[in-house]
């Protein structure tokens, strides 16, 4: 599948043993100094919170919905880091990716495996602490539909499964969402969430550098016919990585006593196609620039495919 040429060494992890969260940070704990009555998540990042059908005069309700959104984000992170990022990073690390990689690059991929396992652990740990201290129970969360949708891209070509898994991690690890930048400085948010996201963002900065360089090498090794195929895998991977999960929001809204019809209206207004696509384009801006830089959009029909999916404005 790939041409045989070594990948240049990447320096993103030079000080990993001193600076990685798993190496340098202590376990985050809610203590008596923490204000557990603060928000668990920035309210402006909860799309359905300010809908007219949600009682704006009920602070307990708003806190409950914000807590459920935070729980969903933490559990998504817990699952995603292992099911998607570790899955692909392990292939890079153990030499089964199909690429000829420098030993140092493979070692760096193992460091990502360690980072992401730790991110998964502390996401679950923080969620449990928030539930236990606040008394706000967490609703059930099913990661299955997300991973199934992601893995469905390219399923008609099972011989490309390994390649698609590598593309999945490239896409997600080069995206830049507002969560990692908005939460740490927001003093309205409980401290344990702010510190956890701050630590996560530092590690993800290294991962972003690694996977940006990795994709450039991956693309350079693809034979021309496969480049065209990859260029058409990427739009749905970007969309499925960033499209908001509305099932957890629906469950949270239903649990507050809203009717099925009311919840349907809230979701339709809060997650409209135009609003969702605008958010995806914003978060994927650096990823799309990376694709443009290496020549993905120059493949036959690729720019049209990205435009038709709403990732590039006509």
Image (spheres, helix red, strand yellow):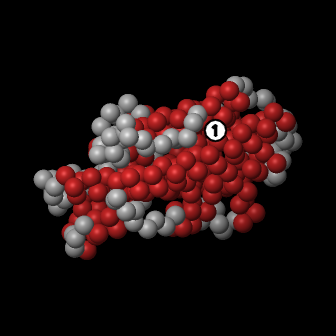
- Measured as percent of width and height from the top left, residue 12 is found at 68, 28
Who's the residue at 19% across and 59% down the image? 54
Whether residue 99 sits left or right of residue 237 in the image: it is right
Tally of numbered discs: 1
At 46% from the left edge and 65% from the top edge, which residue is drawn? 141
Q: Nearer the viewer, residue 161 or 300?
A: 161
- In the rendered image, the residue lying farthest to the left is 57
Q: Quadrant of residue 257?
A: bottom left
156 is higher (above) or lower (below) than 313: below
| Depth check, front residue: 27 or 170 | 27
Give x and y (percent) for residue 129. Answer: 45, 52
Residue 162: image location, x then y, percent: 73, 57
Disc 1 crowd rating (10 Å Cα; few below 14, some 14-19, many 20+) is many
- The residue that mark 1 highlights is 22
Q: Is residue 78 left or right of residue 18?
A: left
Q: Is 305 displayed left or right of 274 in the figure?
A: right
Name the residue: 70% across, 65% down. 157
Q: Helix, strand, or loop for circle 1? A: helix
Res. 159 visible in picture: yes
Q: Is residue 248 visible?
A: no
Q: Quadrant of the C terminus?
A: top left
Lateral position of residue 142 relative to residue 267, left or right = right
**Residue 272 pos. (x, y %):** 30, 56
Nearest to the observer: residue 289 or residue 172: 172
Which quarter of the picture shows residue 294?
A: top right
């Amino acid at each position: 599948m790939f041409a045989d040429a070594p990948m240049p060494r990447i320096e993103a992890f030079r000080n990993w043993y001193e600076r990685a969260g798993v190496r340098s940070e202590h376990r985050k704990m809610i203590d008596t100094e923490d204000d557990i009555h603060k928000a668990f998540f920035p309210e402006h990042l909860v799309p359905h919170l300010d809908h007219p059908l949600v009682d704006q005069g009920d602070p307990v309700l708003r806190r409950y919905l914000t807590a459920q959104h935070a729980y969903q984000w933490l559990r998504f992170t817990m699952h995603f880091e292992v099911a998607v990022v570790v899955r692909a990073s392990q292939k890079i690390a153990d030499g089964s990716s199909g690429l000829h990689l420098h030993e140092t690059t493979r070692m760096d991929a193992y460091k990502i495996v360690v980072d992401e396992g730790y991110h998964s652990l502390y996401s679950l740990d923080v969620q449990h602490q928030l539930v236990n201290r606040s008394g706000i129970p967490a609703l059930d969360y099913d990661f299955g539909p997300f991973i199934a949708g992601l893995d469905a891209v390219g399923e008609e070509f099972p011989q490309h499964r390994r390649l698609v898994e590598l593309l999945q991690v490239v896409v997600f690890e080069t995206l830049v969402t507002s969560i990692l930048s908005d939460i740490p400085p927001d003093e309205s948010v409980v401290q344990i969430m702010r510190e956890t996201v701050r630590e996560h963002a530092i590690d993800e900065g290294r991962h972003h550098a690694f996977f940006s360089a990795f994709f450039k090498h991956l693309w350079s090794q693809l034979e021309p016919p496969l480049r065209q195929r990859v260029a058409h895998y990427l739009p749905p991977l970007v969309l499925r990585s960033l499209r908001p999960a509305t099932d957890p929001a629906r469950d949270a809204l239903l649990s507050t006593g809203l009717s099925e019809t009311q919840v349907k209206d809230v979701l339709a207004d809060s997650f409209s196609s135009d609003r969702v696509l605008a958010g995806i384009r914003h978060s994927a801006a650096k990823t799309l620039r990376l694709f443009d830089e290496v020549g993905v959009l120059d493949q036959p029909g690729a720019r049209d495919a990205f435009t038709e999916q709403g990732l590039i404005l006509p």
